[in-house]
Amino acid sequence: MTAPDEIAIKKLTLKLKAYVLEKFKEANIDYCLTCGMCASGCPATGLEGLDPRKFLRLLALGQDDELLSTNWIYACTICGRCKHACPMGIDVGRIVYLLRGLRPLEDRPKSLQKSCELQKTSCSTGISNEDFVWVVNDVLEETCQNEPDWAELKAPIDKKGAEYYLNQNAKEPTVEPEEMVPLWKILHTVGIDWTYSSKWWDGANYCMFTGDAKDWEYTLRKQVETIEELCCRYYINTE
Amino acid sequence: MNNPKGSVLVIGGGISGIQTALDMADSGLYVHLVESSAAIGGSMGQLDKTFPTNDCSACILSPKLVECGRHLNINLLTLSELVSLDGAAGNFKAVVRQKPRYVDPAKCIACGKCAEKCPKSVPNEYNLGIGKRKAIYLKFPQAVPLKYAIDAKNCIWLNKPGRCGACAKECPAGAINFDEKPVEHVLEVGAVVMAPGFKPYDPSLLDFTGYGRVPNVVTSMEFERLLSPSGPCLGHVERASDKKTPRRIAWLQCVGSRDKNRACHAYCSSVCCMYAIKQAVIAKEHMAGELSAKIFFMDMRTHGKGFEAYFERAKADGIGFERARVHSIIPAPHGKGETGDVLLRFANENGEMCEEVFDMAVLSIGLELDSSTVALASKLGIDLNGDGFLKTQSFMPVLTQRQGVFVCGAASEPKDIPQSVTEASAAAAEVEKLLASARWKETKVKEYPSERDLKGEPPRIGVFVCHCGINIASVVNVKAVTEYAKTLPHVVFSQNNLFTCSQDTIVSMTDIIKREGLNRVVVASCSPRTHEPLFQETLREAGLNRFLFEMANIRDQDSWVHQSEPEKATQKAKELVKMAVAKVASHQPLSEGKLPVTKGCLVIGGGVSGMQAALNLAEQGFAVTLIEKGEALGGQALKLVRNWEGLAVAPVLSELAQQTISHPNITVRFKTQVKDVEGSVGRFKTTLSDGSVVEHGAAIIAVGAEPWVPQGRWQYGYGVDARVKTLHGLDEILKKSQTEALEALSDVNQAVFMHCVGSRIPERPYCSRVCCSHAIEQAIALKDLKPKMDVFMLYRDVRTYGRREHIYEEARSKGVIFVRYDLERLPKLEGVGARLELEAFDPVLGRQIRLSPDLLVLATAITPRKDAGELSKFFKCAINADGFLMEAHAKLRPVDFATEGVFLAGLCHYPKPIEESIVQASAAAARAAMVLAKDFVPTEAIVAEVTPAKCVTCGVCGKICPYKAISKSQVTGKAEVNPALCKGCGACVAGCRSDAIRLKNFANKELIAAISAGGC
């Protein structure tokens, strides 16, 4: 929808603001000084005609329809720079997250929602767990053969009792498998005992980015369960 | 309280401590002034110029430093700290520990040879670490006491005895004493005044500013030193990285203020908006206009007297103002700027991302309390408030929780110099009230040497020419003027000084006068307005009559106005000196009489200010006549419900009124006004409207002000539609019981406040100071009464200065929505009498907002009373362009009038909230007490004199005389001047058609001599 030229306020109806405050008690929306420090540091300022200050303003003025339809909530990367800069410490990113969750499935950015759906089955790019295991072993083998210095390199999978558990962004095994190697080399050089898992190995947070708490929790829980099964002491999150 | 002590301990030697010490010492109390550093002067001494007068800060402070330094009743304890305080109000025992200076002040002649030889250089903290000083140092050129001190931490000898000792070898006076030990002073005092000041915020805690990492990012305090003629670059601003003169400078406001996320300071520091504008204006002046200056701000807070006009002038002069809080400062990348430049990233008010490159960025840092003050507070049993400042009483911000311990200045809340000085006088008034019975019991009396008889002596004139740092010397060739002076008739001595007003020069001037047998003195320097009394005092100390003095104004009227023409300026300085020499040659010693003081005060106005002033003086034991035009006491405060902190006004007001009415020393007269005033300081005779005459030694004008009635384009249906009210109109509802108030507001679902109605507009260009806080306090009250009510604030800049920022935050937290408007886009009201619709533009979204208020509250201007102007004429006081009464000096004499013995307080001075009126009223009482505490006032020496033989008894002079000092002599029948009444204005001299009247030392002889000397 296009932004209206005029906002008429006979009586403020602040349903969305109330929703946000219910879910996020310390949202402090009303504390905004409209100083614009958030917008000054925001990578999404100006995109979709909005910025964090305008976003909060719409919320305070009860412009719920506009907020529920703007794609600015997807331009925002929830990086948290606004919260860092804000003299009042307002966390716009978390509010954006809540609004993303309210967007009907069919209105969400298709690729984002699809990534989440795929992650709920295996990983966000859709490659199978078997493919992941094969790719890791294949790249490892190739490296060990081609690079004599790294003949001893390892990329363990499902190594029970390893000290460190490592997850993996699905993009690398899917399209740029050799990009996984540098991290393996670092871990090898440091000499730590680590492992991947053959399921729920995707460290991406697409289900967080869609704003669906349930989906996010589901994928996260699956990862946690896997780590517990493997009895790893530390969790290295690459995302 | 039995037999209170007549001494007072003042902690802190900044402007607040100095002012409170001087006020008390001049009113009969003995003062111990404790300062932790090696010299008094505090932060004010470090500033370059001061707003809004653009006075040179050190120049207007210096006379006070010197006065403090040589005051017989001020015991200056530098390098000292309070160890403990026992006892109770009236009888405290204070232990003060004084660290060794390692330089004997009695011997040190401040020649500077020690520092010249000292091999150890350390960062100069007076210049905020820019540049170096030695381990033996003088804090600043005009330091009082003007004595060197050794910094024990850095001195080589003190750390490794036997290793250096260069200073001791070099010192011609043998003043160095490495064996000096700390001393503990046990002082018995009746009261304590804390004036410890503030600490500038350290911005290195804020990563985004780049401070400490990005070159050429400086703090505002550092910039003051860069601007200052006595600073590290002698006033020629240069940036640290490459010594280049910056041509583009940015100021960032609210660094360390109004930021509770990273800076942990939610309050506003009150002074930064004005000092940033001042710095931009002065920097532009220094660079002959070749400066592009921009101030990045959130709300421009120019709420003080004369501030808004200063802001407008800065805009007209091309200073840029950008409504944005800058996100980050980084070194300008290649292609965007040169090495050393800084790049600022910010979103403008429209939300567009911007980058701008500057040569330098100045961080307008806020004020906070130093940790040493926190420790001091806990020693004294004084709590801190929520912002970490000293906690004081809401309606009387100089009172603490401990009786007998008072606070003044920035230590209780960030505040500017005029407000600090006012509080300093108010604290003095409270102390004097407490210790009135001990007045003059512990003070010493000044003995001057008897005046030298000059009979038969030809004039022997000494000329002292001042550099005033670079204020004069950067334009005028001071040495040439000094040499020229030697060639003038009767001049037997001439020398030039860096700062003629500094204590060492003053002392050496006394010696020179004696040694050279001078009998007349000319000082060529700044202005007699600020410095004449200081130099005249020096003459007295040297045994000369103080009228054998003349000043040549080669700064204010020469170097400052002819900056671009140094040669002509030097020529003018020579001529001014020549004129002064010619005039002083004919000066004769004049004798000053003294008259008994009428120990009573007339207070005009029965509002909060009038009552507070009257009560304070009455408690000090002086008789007070309080006259009130109306039929009740209370004034404008009767309309108020709460102060900004939410405390009820009515109980405070009724107690004040009750005490005023019942006090035995106060006579209250209702429905009474002033009809005529005769006399002068110490001896006024005022005729009241009922024909009676009151005799009084001092007068305090506290006639208040009134709310403006909305009209013209600012009417907004006021007076036509009952839903449109002023703040006072809404106060009437908020005064009711909760049930009644809710009933009155039952139809109100949306309330809109319109700020700045009648203020900050071309026809009334000042800010009314109180309306933002008042409106916000009301908005909170509405939200508390009816949380579901929509409340909107249409504002121009939210000016909740200082700790008031908390109520702005509280209002927002309760859902009050603030929408900024511009004069160019004034909100429009439609539907008066029907459905009200108010259309405003929201700059955040860039869209129109259409509101439907059921209640529209207009925050109207506070306007001066018309009769204040009439009254001011009786007392020969001035009013400013806005119609408010004009104090003697906006910065350092905020409650005095230029007319001696007359003082002012409250709204007639400028709009202000109730607690500031109370403080100002106490301050006025303290200043009045300085007159009333003394038994005599000196009469004017420069008076008119009639030559009876020439008088034709036409009577013109008697009609002209504004002081009613001329009458017909019973003996000769000719005109006769009563020297006790004459103020030496000279009106009669000009009016006399037969040349029968002359003004002593300003007669034709002297003036013609001066005029003929000019134009050489």
Image (cartoon, rainbow, N blue to C red):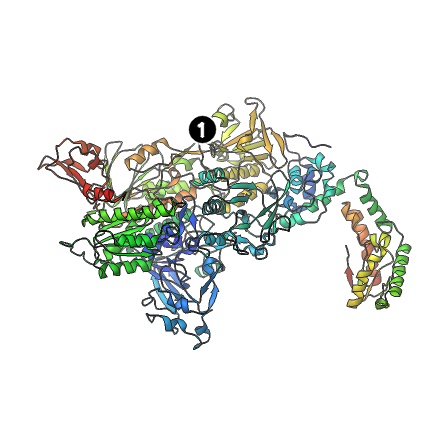
Percent of width and height locating residue B177 = 37, 72
Q: Is residue B670 in view?
A: no
Out of B429 and B289, give the one closest to the viewer.
Answer: B289
Secondary structure type for disc 1: loop
**Foreground pick, B376 / B762:** B762
Task: List the single residue furthest toward the left.
Answer: B971
Q: Quadrant of the N terminus of chain A?
A: top right
Residue at 57% in and 25% down:
B836
Where B318 sits versus A178, above or below? above
Q: Does residue A149 appear in the picture of this structure?
A: yes
Quarter of the rendering containing residue B71: bottom left
Q: Is residue A164 above or below residue B246?
A: below
Q: Quadrant of residue B151?
A: bottom left
Q: Which residue is mark 1?
A: B709
Residue in front for this viewpoint, B544 or B481: B481
Q: Is residue B1012 above or below residue B341?
A: above
Which residue is depicted at the point 82% across and 47% down?
A116
Pick whichever, B57 or B249, lies toward us. Answer: B249
In the image, taking residue B210 as reference, residue B130 lies left or right, namely left
Disc 1: CA contacts within 10 A as few (<14), some (14-19) or many (>=20): some
The amino acid type, in three-letter code, at marker 1 is Val
Name the image quarter holding residue B162: bottom left
Residue B61, percent from left and from top: 37, 52
Labels in figure, total? 1
The chain containing the residue under callout 1 comes to B
Task: Please give left or right for residue A108 compared with residue B600 in the image.
Answer: right
